Image (cartoon, rainbow, N blue to C red):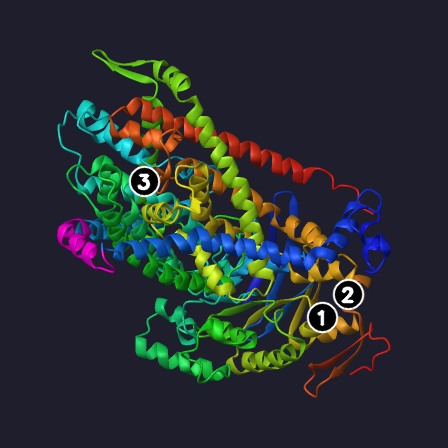
Amino acid sequence: MYLDLSHLKKRFSEKEVVQDLSLSLERGQLLCILGSSGCGKTTTLNMIGGFLTPDGGRILLDGQDITHMPPEQRPVTTVFQSYGLFPHMTVLQNVIYGLKFRAYSKAQAREKGAEYLRLVGLEGYENARIYEISGGQQQRVALARALIVEPKLCLLDEPFSNLDAALRVKMRQELKKLQRDLGMTMVFVTHDQEEALILADYMAIMEKGRLVQYGTPLDIYHQPADSFVSGFLGLDDLLWQPDGSVWKVVKKEVKGESPC
Amino acid sequence: MNKHGTSAPPPRPQGGGDRCGSAGKGASLDALFRLFGRGADKLVLLTLLGLVCLFVLVPIVFIVLRSFRGADGLTLEFYQTVWQQYRDNLWNSVFVGVCTAVLCTLFSVAAALFLATRQRWGKLLCMAILLITMVSPPFVSSLAYIQLYGRRGWITHRLLGLSWNPYNCWGVILMQSISFVPLNALFLNGMLEKLDTGSLQAARDLGAKPAAILRDVVLPLLGPGILVSLLLSFVRSLADFGTPVIIGGRFSTIASEIYLQLVGYSNLEKAAAMNLFLLLPSIAAFFVYRALMRQTDRLAQAGRSRQEALQLPLRRCGAAGVLILAVSLLFFLAMVLQYGCIFLSGFLRSSREGYVFTTQYLKQLFTYDRSTMLRSVGYALIVSLAGTLLAMLFSYYMERRRVPGRHFFDCLVTLPYMIPGTCFGIGYILAFNHPPLKLTGTAVIVLANMLFKQLPTTTKICSAALAQVPTSLERAVRDLGGGQWSVLRDVIFPGLRPAFLSCFVYNFSSSMTTAGAILFLISPGRKLAVFKLFDAVQVGEYATASLIATTIIVLVLAVEGSVYALTTLGARRPAPKRS
């Protein structure tokens, strides 16, 4: 397995936030960790990213034990919920910042930066300041900045939660395409069932620090592990694409409004 | 008591101001506000703006006019004399200002980074040291400097057996730098606390080591703050006359020369003209300062507030990290030595065998100077209460009402922040020494001067607090039937409660400790503690001076501690019964 979490544990003072979490993922796949707030999904992500040290368990990435490796050395990058963009730098400077610590000349870095800006659809914004661009554009800068260093694994912490609904749907599609094109392995944390079902190759549903179910969206839809999962997903029906992935989600709660 | 319900329909007959008792105070006050509201509101606003013009604009205009006024008409005579006679002093001022600005900023950045990266106890200790420096009177560093490193200094003479002359320009630069650090360090620390953790995490995530994070993220984000620190230190150095008078020896700057002209020769015209050399760079600095502050706001907007310590291990930050650690430790050590020296020397008497413990100076202070201390506290209390009220009202009108010309008034109120105290003081003498407004020699001129010198900071505190109160709350009160008075009482004042404490603390410690203009305005019969302190230092009564300084520090901490306790207790009290 490419990414392998085994028996991860984390407690903050008295509260066990993550309890004995094990799961694994193949290269080039996208894993969604889904759960309500406080279920331990962000803690798990921070342990993979190296910002928290697990109290027990092991993290293997591409055969290498990275459990105790500091974030700056891990071949893992993160797209933060608040983006964490450097407000004093331009868009291009933000994107190529990570290349400073890898063997790139200034010119090479600029060239590669332009390429990744094109990839996320931000051509022409090289010299814009962070506070001059919109939220969706900031999101793309953060994504390009995380991907340009060609990490072995890219983590995304509820990256679309600050965007409006329409933009969220658009970004979702773009991210999926980008991930397929680059063959990037990703772990995506969200509390939005629809987002998880549409994006994920694999889904991990967490509740109170425990992994409740792990599998493909199709598996989980057909065989929810327990009443919590089926209740939490709250699904009425899914619309499928020809390739077997989810195209649209029809939720139970929709009452009186015309289902889309 | 149903307050809002009764006040909703305007034309009810119970609306007169004479029925306070029967219909609930809030409702009748609302009604009163409706009847006389517009007039009262306008009156308050006009009074506020009038006061600001009178006590800020008029003195500045007077000082400018006076410096041009010769025996017959306008003249540049005073400027020519000053330029010819005091060119050396000017250069000295600029030289000291630049050196102080650079050195002080270096110290401040190091201390702020050190403070921001400390955990619990370390942070508390550093904050306590900075707090004491914030509430201690001026001249304290100079006083400690003489006692520790002077001709008969504890360290230079008694410990190392040196005999050297400490009275020179380097002493002035060093002491100014050290005494300006706390304010700058706390300001920079505030910026560091607002720093977006996301940016730091992202840099680390992308492979940046601590040294790179410091260089690429932390310092650039601190950039505008560093410039503000340079600017403020430069202007404060220009304005500072105490340090060069006490430890400059034969070295003198424009500010110390102004002090001499005014106190020694009572030459107002010359002093006014010399002051313009300070005023012009200060006003220029003021506009740069405002632009920079806007920039810091913008950089901080991306950030969110953060409680825990800054995750930046200074020890692993390379050469810069080591420098920061060394400089900040040096600074905090100097502070500990300085205050240790001040606290001790009030109780030590030098004799042939060494030092012996004595309460002799304490007794002297209590018998001779009790009235001075009480007067200082009284003045400070008046300024604190009046100043806080004024700041609250002013920020309310500026932030929440579309007052015509508000940018002008906002600018005017902030101006005294950068104007040297000597300038501001001389302006007051010139503006208020003849009828119809003859205030010189009264307590009013001293109080007004303190109040308006401090108003920029307190207004800023109140505005920041008001910005936290959403306008929707005001609308909700109006929507539910409350009037203008209900808005003030139920939304604005509660929202300003945290600001009240900060304003009071700032006003009180500033009033107890600032010397600047007060030295020229005070009348001989009504001396204040700071004045006595300056006298004592100048005539070499170091033990008495140390004791006065200690007393001021203890008094300020005691009063502010009790106000803090009162307001937090008040906040914890269960809410008064409503509806």
Q: Residue at x 68, y 38 (%)?
A: B572
Chain letter for mark 3, please. Answer: B
Q: Are marks 2 and 1 in contact (CB under 8 Å)?
A: yes
Q: CA distance from mark 1 to mark 3?
A: 55 Å
Q: Which mark is residue B149?
A: none
Nearest to N terminus: mark 2 or mark 1? 1
Is residue B116 among what the camera can see? Answer: no
Q: Is residue A173 above or below residue B398?
A: below
Foreground tag (1 vs 3)? 3
Frontmost residue, A187 versus A250: A250
Q: Which mark is residue A193?
A: 1
Looking at the rendered structure, the kind of residue marked 3 is Phe
Q: Residue at x 31, y 35 (%)?
A: B139
Q: Position of residue B236 (x, y in %)?
A: 32, 48
Tell me, yes or no, whether the highlighted magenta stretch contains residue B85: yes
Frontmost residue, B183 versus B71: B71
Report the quarter where the N terminus of chain A lies.
bottom right
Which SS type dominates the magenta stretch?
helix
Q: Secondary structure at mark 2?
A: helix
Q: Position of residue B30 (x, y in %)?
A: 75, 53
In the picture of the structure, the residue carrying the numbered disc 2 is A232
Disc 1 crowd rating (10 Å Cα; few below 14, some 14-19, many 20+) is some
Residue A168 relative to residue B199: left or right: right
In the picture of the structure, the residue carrying the numbered disc 3 is B331
Q: Are marks 1 and 3 in contact (CB under 8 Å)?
A: no
Look at the image and give the residue range highlighted in magenta: B72-90
Q: CA distance from mark 2 to mark 1?
A: 8 Å
Is residue B112 among what the camera can see? Answer: yes
Q: Position of residue B277 (x, y in %)?
A: 25, 55
